[in-house]
Amino acid sequence: MVEQAYVYMLSSTFQKLYIGVTTKIQLRSSQHQAGRYEGSFTSKYKIEKLVYFERYTEISTAIAREKQLKRWSRIKKIRLIVAQNPTWRDLSEEWGKPIATFTEPTP
């Protein structure tokens, strides 16, 4: 059984969008960024910035949500992204980087 599933949106520099579903969001994001699937829609238009994702406990629910989002108008998709990520920051840019150790401030 799958532990988690993700619906995600990628964007190009010019905000061309791609919606997908995966159970391995970090791996899938890095595959898009590396252009792993030559000739694919995401490679052709350099759509590689992870700008939005949702997490689900069931893959079937994630697939249903992906289908729903793909039917939405472009403006509705953009509103969804902007509500969570107003600067269109790449949400995967910090993945794999070391996390600073917390030190409690001295009074």
Image (cartoon, rainbow, N blue to C red):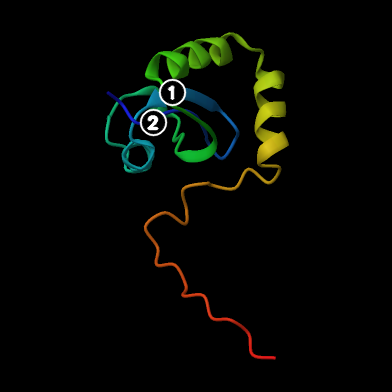
Left or right: residue 83 compared with residue 4: right
Instruction: Kindly identify the amino acid type of the residue bearing the numbered disc 1.
Output: Gly
Q: Nearer the viewer, residue 7 or 41?
A: 7
What is the x, y in percent for residue 70?
54, 13
Left or right: residue 11 compared with residue 6: right
What is the x, y in percent for residue 38?
27, 30
Q: Work out whether mark 1 precedes mark 2 in sequence or the reverse, and give the earlier one.
A: 2
Label 2 crowd bin: few (<14), some (14–19), many (20+), radius 10 Å: some
User: Quick check: 39 above or below 91?
Assistant: above
Mark 2 lies on a secondary structure that is loop
What is the x, y in percent for residue 49?
49, 41
Residue at which label 2 appears: 4
Q: Residue at x 63, y 43 (%)?
A: 88
Left or right: residue 20 compared with residue 72: left
Quick one: which residue is furthest to the bottom in this view?
A: 107
Query: Nearer the observer, disc 1 or disc 2?
Result: 2
User: Quick check: 90 above or below 96?
Assistant: above
Label 1 crowd bin: few (<14), some (14–19), many (20+), radius 10 Å: some
What is the x, y in percent for residue 79?
72, 27
Q: Residue at x 41, y 20 (%)?
A: 58
Residue at which label 1 appears: 20
Q: Nearer the viewer, residue 44 or 1?
A: 1
Look at the image and tell me in which quarter the C terminus lies: bottom right
Measure the alpha-carbon separation of dots 1 and 2.
Answer: 14 Å
Instruction: Kindly identify the amino acid type of the residue bearing the numbered disc 2.
Output: Gln
Mark 1 lies on a secondary structure that is strand
User: Quick check: 59 above or below 26?
Assistant: above
Q: Nearer the viewer, residue 90 or 58?
A: 58
**Residue 37 picture quarter:** top left
Look at the image and tell me in which quarter the N terminus lies: top left
Q: Residue at x 71, y 42 (%)?
A: 86
Left or right: residue 50 compared with residue 2: right
